[in-house]
Image (spheres, rainbow, N blue to C red):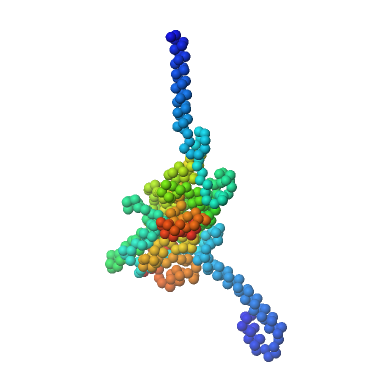
């Protein structure tokens, strides 16, 4: 029995009965209260990704961090995301381009048949089924509950199987003794590393450095957000526009998606 | 001079030499750091604030356990509480160096290194972790410096 039906009956009733009206009012309030907890629960679930987690609360799989990169806005010569990443995480080259750490790089691609060319940033794709985690013999390569794929350097033995397994060439090996690392991005010789999606920033409700730089000085091509939240901007855009995962045929379900590829 | 007297003189000379050598050696072994006696004691920087996060006795015995527990929580679950964070240890116990920045583990004055040298326990935390606070981060409870070289002070971010 809906409230509307009840109200209609009250209005149509020729003889006014205050007792009946108060009963119906109470029923309506009860219905409202019953509805309210559901609404509140729903709003908590929705707002979790944008609001700070409790200090001692672990990350949860309710959130799936992802990125949508619009290649229509990504200029070929621009590498603001790359330099912002290096600055943020304290990546310094050693003059050895073949082995220097690369957490994100710009790749220019061209269709030989049509001549159509694109430039795209390539970073760890934070796969849902990450092959680097599958092959890791020590469990150092792991996927956090919120979808971020990381290397636990405390257990990494530097075997580099994950580098072989990654189809995106997203991982680097540290060959040199390092000094003066950033306190939030520990890195050291003999371990493998890759894009952390700026996990230290995400944990304090900030955007990854590359996304921030892209919107500040670049073309604003990168959108970061929670793919599990239907109300997030990224979810709305991936629902509205066609986007692609690179090598989707491998079934790794990357969290990084590209538009206009 | 009889051979017997000759032997006595020789022994006396050797004894004098050995005593003087011992005196010189003990002077050379004098500890560079605090404390008297022949054992070099660690230089323990007091840290900021009134007290550590736990009693000194507890920290001496268990700091490695709480650090390891915190490390796994932060790495795998994203829990970035500050109480047992290595970063907070390093920030709070920073020892000022000659260049106005805190010293790194390359200096024997470094808080962690000083004690670990004394105990002859090697640690590899600082092969990856920063052994001094970031230039733009000041220890908790300190007023931000207006002459920070690297821009604004980070707001207590782990």
List x then y, in percent, for residue B9. Answer: 45, 15
Q: Is residue A51 above or below residue B54?
A: below
Position of A124 with respect to B75 (left or right) is: left
Query: Which x, y percent locates residue A250?
Result: 41, 60
**In the displayed image of the protein, which residue is found farthest to the top?**
B2
- Picture coordinates of residue A118, whole percent (x, y): 32, 66
Using residue A6 as the reference point, say whether residue A145 is left or right of it: left
Figure check: A146 above or below B108: below
Side of A36 relative to A147 (left or right): right
> What residue do we see at 45% from left, 57% from top?
B145
Q: Residue at x 44, y 47 (%)?
A: B97
In the depicted view, which residue is nearer to us: A55 or A43? A55
> Vertical placement of B98 versus A81: above or below?
above
Is A34 in front, or is B124? B124
x and y percentages locating residue B4 in the rendered image: 46, 10
Give B63 or A220, whichever is nearer the viewer.
Answer: B63
Residue extending furthest toward the bottom: A14
- The answer to whether residue A165 shows anywhere in this view is no
Q: Check the picture and name the quadrant holding the N terminus of chain A.
A: bottom right
Q: Residue at x 63, y 74 (%)?
A: A33
Q: Quadrant of the C terminus of chain A?
A: bottom left
């Amino acid at each position: 029995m809906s409230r509307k039906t009840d109200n209609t009956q009250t209005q149509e009733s020729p003889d006014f009965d205050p007792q009946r009206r108060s009963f119906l009012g109470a029923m309506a309030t009860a219905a409202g209260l019953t509805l309210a907890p559901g609404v509140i629960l729903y709003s908590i679930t929705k707002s979790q990704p944008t609001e700070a987690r409790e200090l001692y609360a672990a990350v949860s799989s309710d959130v799936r961090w992802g990125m949508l990169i619009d290649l229509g806005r990504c200029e070929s010569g621009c590498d603001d995301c790359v330099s912002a990443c290096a600055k943020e995480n304290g990546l310094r080259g050693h003059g050895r381009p073949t082995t220097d750490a690369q957490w994100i790089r710009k790749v220019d691609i061209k269709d030989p048949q049509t001549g159509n060319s694109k430039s795209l940033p390539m970073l760890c794709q934070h796969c849902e089924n990450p092959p680097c985690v599958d092959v890791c013999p020590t469990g150092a390569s792991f996927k956090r509950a919120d979808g971020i794929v990381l290397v636990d350097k405390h257990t990494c033995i530097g075997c580099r199987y994950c580098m072989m397994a990654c189809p995106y060439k997203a991982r680097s090996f540290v060959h040199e003794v390092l000094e003066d690392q950033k306190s939030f991005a520990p890195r050291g010789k003999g371990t493998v590393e890759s894009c952390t999606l700026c996990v230290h920033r995400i944990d304090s409700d900030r955007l990854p450095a590359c996304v921030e730089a892209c919107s500040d000085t670049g073309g604003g091509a990168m959108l970061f957000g929670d793919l599990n939240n239907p109300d997030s901007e990224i979810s709305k855009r991936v629902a509205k526009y066609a986007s692609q995962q690179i090598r989707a045929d491998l079934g790794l379900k990357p969290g990084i998606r590209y538009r206009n590829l | 001079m009889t051979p017997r007297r000759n032997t006595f003189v020789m022994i006396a000379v050797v004894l004098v030499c050995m005593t003087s050598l011992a005196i010189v050696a003990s002077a050379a072994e004098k500890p560079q750091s605090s404390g008297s006696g022949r054992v070099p004691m660690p230089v323990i920087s007091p840290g900021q604030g009134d007290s550590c996060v736990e009693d000194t006795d507890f920290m001496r015995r268990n700091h490695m356990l709480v650090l390891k527990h915190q490390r796994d929580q932060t790495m795998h679950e994203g829990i970035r509480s500050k109480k047992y964070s290595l970063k907070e240890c390093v920030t709070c116990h920073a020892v000022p160096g000659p260049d106005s920045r805190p010293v790194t583990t390359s200096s024997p004055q470094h808080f962690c290194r000083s004690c670990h040298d004394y105990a002859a326990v090697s640690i590899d935390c600082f092969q990856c972790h920063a052994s001094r606070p970031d230039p733009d981060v000041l220890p908790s409870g300190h007023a931000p410096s207006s002459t920070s070289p690297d821009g604004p002070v980070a707001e207590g971010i782990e």
